[in-house]
Image (cartoon, helix red, strand yellow):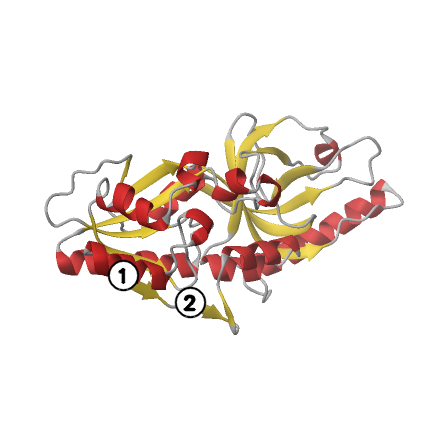
Amino acid sequence: MRLEGPPLELGPAGAVVTVGTFDGVHLGHRKVLAEIVQRSRSSGRNSVLVTFDPHPLKVIRPEQAPPLLTTLEEKIPLLEQTGIDYLCVLPFTPTLRAYSARRFATDVLLELVGMRELVMGYDHGFGRGREGSPDTMREIGGELGFEVDVVDAVVVDGEPVSSSRVRGLLSEGRVAEAGRLLARPYSLHGIVEAGAHQGRRLGFPTANVRVAGADKMLPRGGIYAGYGSVGEIRLPGLIHLGPRPTFAGLGPSVEIHLLDWSGDLYGHDLRVEFCGWLREIVAFDSVEALVDQMHRDAEAGRALLSGAGSQSACA
C-alpha cells in the first residue's frame, strides 16, 4: 500500500473505491476493505480508500467531534494490513465540506481517483449533509457510469459494530469488549517521560506516558491489565489511567508497571495495550495499604493475561 494524494494514475482499469473516516479500523471497516480488495483483484482494478484528516466533525461541528480511536499515524499501519493498494488522505476543509455528493463523485472519485466501482457501508453517507446515501449514490452511479455495492453490517452480540459503539465501551472501561470489536487490543502510545517516582519508591516502578495525539480517546480511568511495547519487545504490565488520590498534589497520569522487568525507558515511544479491567482507582488510608493492593493487582493481572481470566482482549 502506498500513501498518495490524488490524482492517481491507475491506468484504464480504474479503481474500486470506498470512502470514510474508518476511525478504529474495526470489524465493520475491515469487512468493507476486504470487499474492495476482493473486487479489485477479480476485476484487475486497484483498491483505493479515500479518507479525511482531520475528522469531518472537527470542521462541521467541532463541539461534537468525537475523540479518535486511531490517529492518522496509528491508522496507516492498520490499513496496510488489509491489503488495499492505495490510501488517499484528503484534507477536510470548509470547501470540501460544501461539496455535494455528485460533485464529490465527479471531481474527486471519478476525475482524480479513477473510480469504476464504489463500495459503501450500509449506513454510510458522504457529501454535503451526508446526502450521498447508498440509494442516492446508486442513482448518481447510474447516470455517471459507475457501480455501487453496499456491505451489510457486522453484528456482534446482536448489535452492529461501529466506532461509536467502541467509544461507548471504552468510556465504561470495558476494554476487553472493545477489543473484540476492533479485532485487537485497544492501544495508545507516547513518549516515556520522568514522573514523580512514587512507583519506584513503592517497589512498582512505572513508565509515565505522554499520550500522542491531542484528540486520542482514553478509556475510563482505572487499573487495567495489559502490555507495553517498545520496538519488538512486548511485556505484560499493570496500567494506571487517571487520578492518583493517595498522593496529594499529583495529577492524573497514564503509566504502566511492566511485570518482571527493569530498565530505563525514558525518551522511548511506548505502546500501551489495554487487555482487561481490574478495578477502580481509590484513595488508600496508607502507603502500606496501597502496596498490598498493588500486589493483589499484579496477581490478578497475571491471571488475566495468562488466559485464566475471561475478560482478556489480548492473545
Q: Which residue is mark 2?
A: 153
136 on left or right of 203:
left
- The answer to which of 150 and 290 lies nearer the viewer is 150
Residue 234 lies, in percent from the top left, at: 48, 44
Residue 302: which quarter of the image?
A: bottom right
Question: Which residue is found at the position 65% from the left and 56% from the top?
Answer: 277
Q: In which quadrant will I find the N terminus? A: top left
Q: Residue furthest bottom?
A: 158
Q: Which residue is mark 1?
A: 148
Residue 109 lies, in percent from the top left, at: 27, 46
Q: Residue furthest right?
A: 285
Question: Which residue is found at the position 42% from the left and 67% from the top?
Answer: 153
Question: Which residue is found at the position 71% from the left and 42% from the top?
Answer: 242
Q: Amino acid at mark 1?
A: Val
Q: Is residue 38 above or below residue 92?
A: below
- The answer to which of 303 and 31 lies nearer the viewer is 31
Q: Is residue 119 above or below residue 89?
A: below
Residue 56 lies, in percent from the top left, at: 48, 42
Q: Is residue 32 above or below residue 53?
A: below
Q: Amino acid at mark 2?
A: Ala
Question: Which mark is drawn over residue 32?
Answer: none
Q: What secondary structure is found at the residue carrying circle 1?
A: strand
In this rendering, does residue 9 appear at all? yes
